[in-house]
Image (cartoon, rainbow, N blue to C red):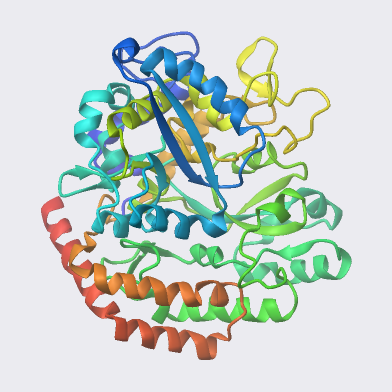
Amino acid sequence: MKKGITLVKSAFLMPLALSLVLAGCSSNKSTDTGSSASPKNTDAVSTQAPKLKPAEVSIYYPGSPQKDVALVEGEMNKILKEKINATVKINAVDWSNWTQKINLMSASNEPFDLVFTASWDNFSGNIAKGAFVDMLPLMDKYGQDIKKSINPLFISGNTLNGKLYALPTQKEFASQQGMFLLKDLVDKYNIDIKSINKLSDLEPILQTIKDKEPDVIPMWGTSNWKQVLPYESIGNAKVPGALVKGGDLKVVNQYEQADIKQYYELMYSWNKKGFFQKDAATNTDGTPSAKAGKVFAQWSQLKPGADGEYNTTHDRKVVQVELEKTPFTTTGDLNNSMLAISRTSNDPERAMMVLNLLHSDAKLLNLLVNGVEGKQYVKVAGKDNVIKLPDGVKAGDTGYTPGANWMFGNQFLNYLWDNEDPQKWQKYDTFNKAATATKALGFTFDSSNTKNEEAAIVSIYDSYREGLGAGVLDPAKALPEMNDKLKKAGVDKVIAEMQKQLDEFMKNKK
């Protein structure tokens, strides 16, 4: 395994690394690279608005609906009307209803435009059933600013058979699994976070919180904790079939491995000890409890300054703890946060124009992710790209705190909050370069030949996922039961197809 993402496809990555450095270092200076990473560069190439008919472009993403969304839409529309004669309608869908809502909208041919998607959100399955349009022709015509700022490797995880089905957020392209812990309780109980190297190290700490902090949930029980295990999913993350990070290229059913059995046994034990929220298998949205400061430990995918981003929208602060000591770059990191254009869109061209502006117009993007200046934030004197809360306003109480920076556009255009590291973007670059690139980087599984099996498999997995992950189901019984049902549904056929396609990919890659 080669250490360092810069060793993989270096011809592609050198310009991307350069663009990230420029994103962190540039101020008023323009460059001759065509990068739009600097927040100062807000003059995106625009279509002649007067020649375009009025259009409304909807944006759907998973998250909590925001009170002041209409105010934000109004300010965004001032820019969009001038540049592309369009308006935008922002639709946040609660996480607990997200998958069902979007699947129903797509199946019923309900018109909608830009929609969040990800490898862990059935991206490959949605491709197989034709839910998204091919964006390449649209990007060639209406996405010139995107093409200037994004590296070809960055979209390799979203292409299949020469078609581009979604465009990733420009952000970190490596990941590190870990958790957030409430900082005041870490300090109160003198918890040495450096002593936490694996999930089981949390047990005595969680017991302390349970015994001494009755108003706090020691740990939010969720299937997401499974991600701290060293597996790289191939295709839909809800479908078994994974590579061991740092291992060989043999696709395995991770739910038949010893470490996942041990993980589920630990979750079952912790739930019985009362470490998790009540009704953990059904009470799956931890956002309200976390925003209220009622959760001590929660899973998170980490990056430099992840706790700082969290703390801008939460009044009770957290610190981050890395359980995965080495960051990895997988295909899943290239397609873990994207926007696609629905096949039911009435105006895919205008949707692409909006997407292009989210990757190039800093003012528009910051309205979407941070809200309206003077209402949700104010700029720090003398620092155009640093913002803070208005005087007397608490984090999370501004009327618009979607916490969805990582879902949209070119994150390097985002303003920094005054409590964030001013070197954040440079540290992103260092983080990316330090990551270990997995051998299968760039491989995208085509599930066309197994979509029927996958539909049944996802249904089975979903019926066990939270029960096992939140320790409600006894893994001694439920895990072999789930695996038996998966085999009957054709999981071995799917894994064999994954292996076949991966072998072909590696043969052509050499």
Q: Residue at x 17, y 57 (%)?
A: 506
- The image quadrant where one finds the N terminus is bottom left
- Residue 493 placed where, x, y %? 22, 77
In the drawing, does residue 263 fall left or right of residue 313? left
Instruction: Give 370 or 433, whichever is nearer the viewer.
Output: 370
- Residue 257 placed where, x, y %? 41, 79
Q: Quadrant of residue 38?
A: top left
In the drawing, does residue 92 fall left or right of residue 87? right
Residue reaching furthest to the bottom: 477
Q: Quadrant of residue 346?
A: top left
Q: Residue at x 29, y 78 (%)?
A: 491
Observer able to see residue 422: no
Instruction: Give 97 or 203, whichever is nearer the viewer.
Output: 97
- Residue 65 placed where, x, y %? 61, 43
Observer able to see residue 233: yes
Please, is residue 384 above or below residue 133 in the view? above
Q: Residue at x 61, y 77 (%)?
A: 471
Q: Residue at x 30, y 31 (%)?
A: 14
Please, is residue 176 above or below residue 457 in the view? above
Please, is residue 183 above or below residue 148 in the view? below
In the drawing, does residue 58 fall left or right of residue 214? left
Please, is residue 82 above or below residue 333 in the view? above
- Disc tally is 0
